[in-house]
Image (cartoon, helix red, strand yellow):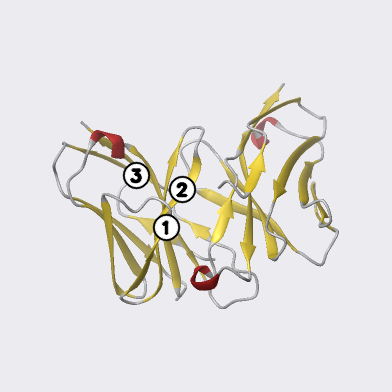
Amino acid sequence: GEDVEQSLFLSVREGDSSVINCTYTDSSSTYLYWYKQEPGAGLQLLTYIFSNMDMKQDQRLTVLLNKKDKHLSLRIADTQTGDSAIYFCAESSADRGSTLGRLYFGRGTQLTVWP
Amino acid sequence: DVKVTQSSRYLVKRTGEKVFLECVQDMDHENMFWYRQDPGLGLRLIYFSYDVKMKEKGDIPEGYSVSREKKERFSLILESASTNQTSMYLCASSLYPGPSYEQYFGPGTRLTVT
């Protein structure tokens, strides 16, 4: 978890955009992921981006990747109260010896959406 | 759709008991993982398995063991439960090698050790 960092809390008003940020340290990361966890539930994969891409858009979600700065962000447009959840950033590495296939997670950002 | 199921959503055990948490996936994935999740600490990897009967320690394996006798099933064992093992336990699976290595998670088991 120390390789991937996120801020712990974010509050926004319903209808605004939310931007959740993440930084990582492994320059050999191949894929970066965003997961969502609703209260009492497991993690749900929202989207992922390959490291040679700058941006990926999927409906209300936009992922931006700045590989030079090792910075990943998730933008949620027109945020709704149903978007309130914990959002986890994760990265995979192609070069971690026997741990191939392992993901490294941040601590999660609690997004609270106010009506 | 990938489905990962865990044997219990909630479990209450006493200190010193042997506890089994079961996880089953239906997508023929090679990799399976056990995490624990605690407030403010995020997900911490306990053990993972990349094939039947194969396992590797994660970041916090102490006090836990695992078993993978069949490809679809991965069990986490608390040999002698202690109160500091009260936590949410999450199982995940992934296809490896695969196109993007994403992990699919079960709903979690909230374990309370009294």
Going by the picture, which residue comes out furthest to the top?
A115
Q: Using the image, determine if residue A3 lies above or below residue B27.
A: above
In the rendered image, residue A33, in percent from the top left (x then y), is placed at 66, 56
Q: Residue at x 81, y 36 (%)?
A: A78
Say which of marks 3 and 2 sits in front. Answer: 2
In the rendered image, residue B76, in percent from the top left (x then y), is placed at 29, 57
Q: Is residue A63 left or right of residue A7?
A: right
Who is closer to the viewer here, A63 or B4? A63
User: Any mark on residue B44, and which?
Assistant: 2
Residue type, mark 1 in image: Gly
Badges 3 and 2, same chain: yes
Q: Is residue A84 left or right of residue B65?
A: right
The 10 Å Cα crowd at callout 1, few under 14, some 14 to 19, many 20 or more, is: some
Dot 2: what SS? strand
User: Any mark on residue B58, and which?
Assistant: 1
Dot 3: what SS? loop
Say which of marks 3 and 1 sits in front. Answer: 1
Q: Are marks 1 and 2 in contact (CB under 8 Å)?
A: yes
The residue tagged 3 is: B9
The 10 Å Cα crowd at callout 3, few under 14, some 14 to 19, many 20 or more, is: some
Q: Earlier in the sequence, mark 3 or mark 1?
A: 3
Spatial separation of the CA atoms under disc 3 and disc 2: 19 Å
Indicate the chain on which mark 2 is placed: B
Q: Residue at x 50, y 68 (%)?
A: A99
